[in-house]
Structures are given as C-alpha cells and as structure tokens.
Image (spheres, rainbow, N blue to C red):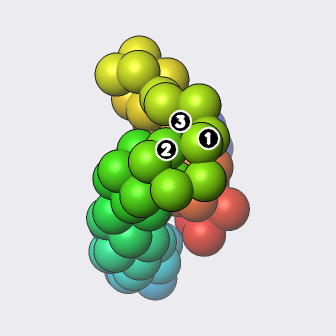
Amino acid sequence: MQDKKAGFPPKDERTIYVEGRAAHYTFIISGWFLVGLIWYNGFGVSVFGLPELNAVQALAASILVMAAIYAGLR
C-alpha cells in the first residue's frame, strides 16, 4: 500500500514478463493435456477398457490442471 501511495506501479516490467511467459506455457501445456484427454476417451476407452470421462469430468480436470500449471509457473 505504501508503494501505491508513493506512486509506484503495482507491477513492474519483469512481473509482467514472467506472467506473460507463464500464460504462454500454460496455454501450450494445457493444449497437450486436452489432446491427452481426447486420446484417453478415444483410444483408452476402446482398447484398454478404461472408464469414459463425461463432459463435466473432462472440463473440471482441464480447468484444475490449467489453474495449477499457471499458479506453479507464475
């Protein structure tokens, strides 16, 4: 709060850069995770007899993974 009152910006250039890189890598990793979910529901269910994921389970897993990756990288 003291920095804000003194006129310093809440985020500097390095913080913005790190958050941007974290978002970039989160996007790439989550894309591969979604491809893995597609392979799981297609290949894993038919070949290995794994239980099929419904839309709610797949969406919840993808959101949790994306949030965890971004939080970890940030």
Q: Position of residue 8 (x, y in %)?
A: 44, 60
Mark identifier at residue 50:
1
Q: Which element carries disc 2, helix, strand or loop?
A: helix
Point 39% across, 29% down: residue: 59
Q: Is residue 1 left or right of residue 44?
A: right
| Amino acid type, mark 3 | Ala
Q: Nearer the viewer, mark 1 or mark 3?
A: 1
Sooner in the amino-acid sequence: mark 2 or mark 3: 2
Disc number for residue 45: 2
Q: Answer with the quarter of the image where residue 43 lies.
A: bottom left
Q: Position of residue 27 (x, y in %)?
A: 32, 66
Q: Does the CB distance between marks 2 and 1 fall below 8 Å?
A: yes
Q: Earlier in the sequence, mark 1 or mark 3?
A: 1
Reading the image, the residue beneath label 3 is: 61
Compared with residue 6, is residue 29 higher up or lower down, i.e. above or below?
below
Q: Residue at x 61, y 41 (%)?
A: 50
Question: How far apart, in angstroms, are the residues tagged by discs 2 and 3?
Answer: 17 Å
Camera-side residue of 54 and 32: 54
First-in-chain label (2 vs 1): 2
Classify mark 3: residues with Cα within 10 Å, few (<14), some (14-19) or many (20+).
some
Above-or-below relation of 41 to 56: below
Q: Residues within 10 Å of mark 1 (few under 14, many from 20)?
A: few
Q: Give the quadrant of the C terminus.
A: bottom right
Quadrant including the N terminus: top right
What amino acid is found at the position of numbered circle 2 in the picture? Val
Query: For the residue labelled by badge 3, is the local secondary structure a helix, a strand or a loop?
Result: helix
Local secondary structure at mark 1: loop
Question: Which residue lies at the image location 60% right of the left edge and 53% below the top edge?
Answer: 48
Q: Is residue 28 above or below residue 38?
A: below
Could you tell me how far apart the alpha carbons at marks 2 and 1 are, in whole angstroms? Answer: 5 Å
